[in-house]
């Protein structure tokens, strides 16, 4: 093999090695820094989960029934914005290894509950459909955060 070809292969190998190390360092920094803060404000938009059919808003006070593992469900009154996750800063703490420290946020607006995933690794689903963006959740609908089920009551 000519000497020029050997040198080109060496340079390409070194470049790919440095590229790999760069992406590894970036991933480690992102993991150690924790989740990014919520950057975008909530938008009032229709539900983006399958069908888009959501029951009308309820005039009664809303509660979240949180069921983690085999334990009995707990009822959490919801009046404004609540972050759910396994981190110490979460408003609703769940002991769930499949959830992120700040997994999702529940918000009450116009007498209805809205949920938005906060960039979690495993995502958030509403009635079995993964959500993208802010999604309206009606009474009786179930939100899955990791392996935890949250039902609006």
Image (cartoon, rainbow, N blue to C red):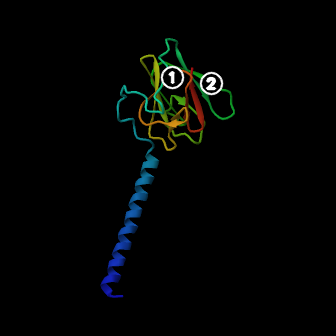
**Residue 66 falls left or right of residue 90:** right
Q: Going 46% across and 48% down the picture, which residue do you hit?
A: 32
Marker disc for residue 138: 1
**Residue 153 falls left or right of residue 17:** right
Residue 11 falls in image quadrant: bottom left
Find residue 6 and report its horizontal and vertical position in percent.
35, 82
> Which mark is nearer the camera, 1 or 2?
1
Which SS class for mark 1? loop
**Residue 15 falls left or right of residue 50:** left
Find residue 20 and report its horizontal and vertical position in percent.
41, 63
Depicted 100 relative to depicted 6: above or below: above
- Viewer-side residue, 54 vs 79: 54
Q: Going 50% across and 40% down the picture, which residue do you hit?
A: 123
Marker disc for residue 95: none
Find residue 130 and report its horizontal and vertical position in percent.
50, 38
Residue 14 falls in image quadrant: bottom left
Q: Which residue is mark 2?
A: 74
Depicted 102 relative to depicted 78: above or below: below
Name the residue at the bottom extreme.
2
Name the residue at the left extreme.
4
Q: Going 46% across and 20% down the picture, which residue do you hit?
A: 112
Rendered-image quadrant of the N terminus: bottom left
**Residue 76 falls left or right of residue 36:** right
Instruction: Classify mark 1: residues with Cα within 10 Å, few (<14), some (14-19) or many (20+).
Output: many
Which SS class for mark 2? strand
Comes first in the chain, label 1 or label 2: 2
Q: CA distance from mark 1 to mark 2?
A: 19 Å
Find residue 92 and report its horizontal and vertical position in percent.
54, 29
Name the residue at the top extreme.
59
Query: Are the residues flagged by discs 1 and 2 in contact, CB closer than 8 Å?
Result: no
Instruction: Classify mark 2: residues with Cα within 10 Å, few (<14), some (14-19) or many (20+).
Output: few
Rendered-image quadrant of the C terminus: top right
């Amino acid at each position: 093999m000519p000497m020029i070809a050997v040198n080109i292969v060496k340079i390409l190998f070194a470049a790919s090695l440095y590229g790999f190390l760069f992406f590894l360092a970036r991933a480690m920094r992102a993991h150690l820094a924790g989740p990014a803060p919520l950057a975008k404000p909530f938008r009032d938009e229709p539900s983006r989960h399958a069908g888009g059919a959501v029951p009308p808003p309820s005039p009664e006070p809303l509660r979240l029934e949180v069921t983690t593992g085999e334990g009995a469900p707990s009822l959490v009154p919801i009046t404004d914005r609540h972050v759910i996750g396994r981190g110490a800063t979460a408003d609703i703490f769940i002991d769930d290894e499949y959830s992120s420290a700040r997994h999702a946020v529940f918000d009450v607006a116009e007498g209805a509950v809205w949920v938005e995933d906060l960039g979690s690794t495993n995502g958030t689903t509403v009635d079995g459909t993964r959500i993208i963006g802010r999604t309206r959740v009606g009474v009786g609908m179930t939100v899955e955060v990791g392996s935890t089920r949250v039902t609006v009551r």
